[in-house]
């Protein structure tokens, strides 16, 4: 198990980046490619969709519902 300290300020900044890139993207695939450039990916599990780090997949924050569409 890996302990990850969660900082609300950092999470808010990352979520802002992710959603800003979503507005710029032409498609969901384009959005995911843009996120990879910043070292992030999207992961879905029972709790919802999360922004995670690459390459290790450490969850950073949860996306608001409806963000994928």
Image (cartoon, rainbow, N blue to C red):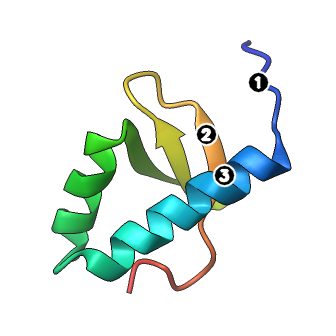
Mark 3 and mark 1: Cα distance apart in space: 12 Å
Res 23 label: none
Res 59 label: 2
Q: Who comes first in sequence, dot 3 or dot 1?
A: 1
* Residue pictured at 51% horizontal, 41% vertical: 52
Res 61 label: 3
Q: Position of residue 55 (x, y in %)?
A: 37, 23
Callout 1 touching callout 2 (CB < 8 Å) = yes
Q: Position of residue 68 (x, y in %)?
A: 41, 78
Which of the 4 image quarters holds residue 37?
Answer: top left
* Secondary structure found at label 3: strand
Q: Position of residue 54 (x, y in %)?
A: 39, 30
Q: Position of residue 2 (x, y in %)?
A: 72, 14
Toward the top, the furthest residue is 1
In this rendering, position of residue 26 left or right of residue 34? left
* Residue pictured at 70% horizontal, 50% vertical: 11
Which of the 4 image quarters holds residue 69?
Answer: bottom left
* Secondary structure found at label 1: loop
Foreground of the two, 58 or 40: 40
Callout 2 touching callout 3 (CB < 8 Å) = yes
């Amino acid at each position: 198990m890996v302990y990850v300290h969660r900082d609300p300020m950092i999470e808010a900044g990352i979520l802002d980046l992710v959603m800003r890139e979503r507005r710029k993207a032409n498609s969901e695939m384009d959005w995911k490619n843009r996120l990879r450039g910043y070292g992030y990916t999207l992961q879905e599990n029972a709790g919802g969709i999360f922004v995670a780090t690459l390459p290790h997949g450490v969850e950073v924050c949860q996306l608001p519902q409806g963000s994928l569409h």
